[in-house]
Image: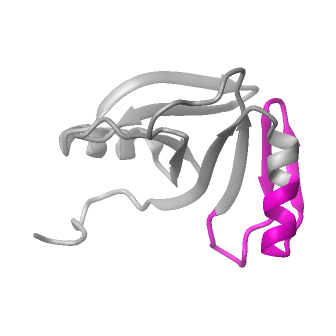
Amino acid sequence: MEITEPDAPAARIATIMVNAVDAERLAEFWAALLGTAVSTRFDQFVWLQPAGPGAPQLAFQQVEQPTEGRRRLHLDIHGPDPAALRALAESLGAGFVEGNDIGDFHWDVMQDPEGNEFCIAGD
């Protein structure tokens, strides 16, 4: 199996997103444990400062009910061409769940071939 395809869009893990009933409290816990700080708050989201340049951020998404089962967290995949990245994911067996917007930021919720959710967005 080839690791990368020559025409594949560049992609990186931008965020590890954790669902939380109290996103602020959970963000403060993880910030203290990891020796970092909250970097951004927007709407129902709280992001921690990344460990270093290019490192993924740990973030928390406010939800009304605790997420049951195995989908309490998911990866956010960012790239310069999210439409091409989505097309590649779908060609590899991913399924589209829904699109979301906050202001001018758009992301697509996807499922890998086993139903694990992840999001695709632009850089």
The residue stretch that appears in magenta: 28-56
Q: Residue at x 78, y 52 (%)?
A: 47
Q: Residue at x 30, y 39 (%)?
A: 87
- The figure's colour scheme reads one colour
**In which image quadrant can residue 102 be found?**
top right
Q: Residue at x 44, y 40 (%)?
A: 70
Which residue is nearer to you in this view: 115 or 85? 115
Q: Return the x and y of residue 106 as percentages of the image width and height.
A: 61, 31
- Left/right of residue 62 with respect to residue 100 in the rendered view: right
Magenta residue check for 30 = yes
Q: Considering only vertical position in the picture, is 39 above or below 86? A: below
Q: Considering only vertical position in the picture, is 55 above or below 70? A: below
Q: How many marks?
A: 0
Residue extending farthest to the bottom is 52
Q: Return the x and y of residue 83 as percentages of the image width and height.
A: 41, 38
Magenta residue check for 49 = yes
- Left/right of residue 62 with respect to residue 71 in the rendered view: right
- Left/right of residue 60 with respect to residue 4 in the rendered view: right
**In which image quadrant can residue 117 be found?**
top left
Q: Considering only vertical position in the picture, is 106 above or below 79? A: above
- Left/right of residue 123 with respect to residue 96 in the rendered view: right
Q: Residue at x 46, y 21 (%)?
A: 98
Q: Return the x and y of residue 75 as percentages of the image width and height.
A: 51, 50
* The N terminus, quarter of image: bottom left
**In which image quadrant can residue 92 be found?**
top left
